[in-house]
Amino acid sequence: MNHPPAVGEKAQHLEQLLQRVEAGEAFESVRAELDLRIQEKDLPELRAKYEAGGRKWEALIDGRYGHPQTAHGALREWMYERKREDESLTARELGEEIAERFGVQLSEGHTNYLLRKMELTRPPGRPNRGGKPTGSEVVSTPTASPDYSLENGGIFFPGSGQARDGDYRGRGAVYGDGPAGVRGDPSGSIAADSGE
């Protein structure tokens, strides 16, 4: 497999570090000279990897290029198939199933990233649960009846009462009671005020 030059160079520097430390050089000075960012406690693991790979620098190639590969191929394929089976699954729900099945913790953001790459993401917004209408469905609203009152319309839309009923400013009108001299009552009948 072709690796980026920086990855191969790092593996070669790790090989040099291991060989020079084995020869008796000080870890800190070799690490600083080779510009590596590893800890001395990581040496036994690197040495085992190097030995298992036949003492070749290629065995020290990380292969991850700095990104953890917790979402391996089998996990991704299972996740994609699971999402195709049930499109309503959220990233959180998929993450919980992945943790149970594979023992791997994926963040919701990373799960969504992987789904987006395969165009398996859900539409934006809250999930449709319990038969509530989605944004694409038309929701009908009741039409106003002729006796539907807009008496308080002027509170929210200044001037709306003027255009409809005339100017009542300065004549003792009380918001919610309609024009001065006419008071609404809960029964729906309108009684003329005595003109106080």
Image (spheres, rainbow, N blue to C red):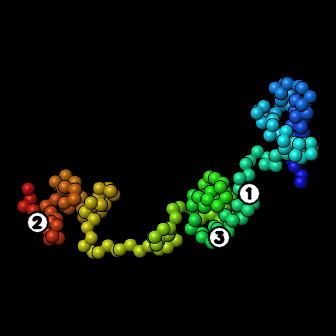
Mark 2 vs mark 1: in front: 1
Q: CA distance from mark 3 to mark 1?
A: 18 Å
Which residue does the image show at 27% across and 60% down from the upper left? 152
Q: Position of residue 112 (x, y in %)?
A: 63, 58
Mark 3 vs mark 2: in front: 3
Which residue does the image show at 92% across and 42% down from the upper left? 55
Comes first in the chain, label 3 or label 2: 3
Kindly indicate the quadrant of the structure image that contains residue 156: bottom left
Residue 72 shows which numbered tag?
1
Contact check, label 3 and label 2, Cβ < 8 Å: no
Q: Secondary structure at mark 3?
A: helix
Please tell me whether residue 139 is drawn above or below residue 33 in the rendered image.
below
Please tell me whether residue 31 is drawn above or below residue 120 in the rendered image.
above
Residue labelled with disc 2: 192
Q: Secondary structure at mark 2?
A: strand
Q: Mark 3 is on which residue type?
A: Arg
Front residue of this view, candidates 158 and 4 = 4
Which residue does the image show at 19% across and 52% down from the upper left? 170
- Which quarter of the figure is the C terminus placed in? bottom left
Residue labelled with disc 3: 84
Q: Residues within 10 Å of mark 1 (few under 14, many from 20)?
A: few
Q: Position of residue 186 (x, y in %)?
A: 16, 67
Which residue does the image show at 20% across and 61% down from the upper left? 178
Instruction: Specify whether 183 is left or right of 139.
Output: left
Q: Mark 2 is on which residue type?
A: Ala
Comes first in the chain, label 2 or label 1: 1
Kindly indicate the quadrant of the structure image that contains residue 41: top right
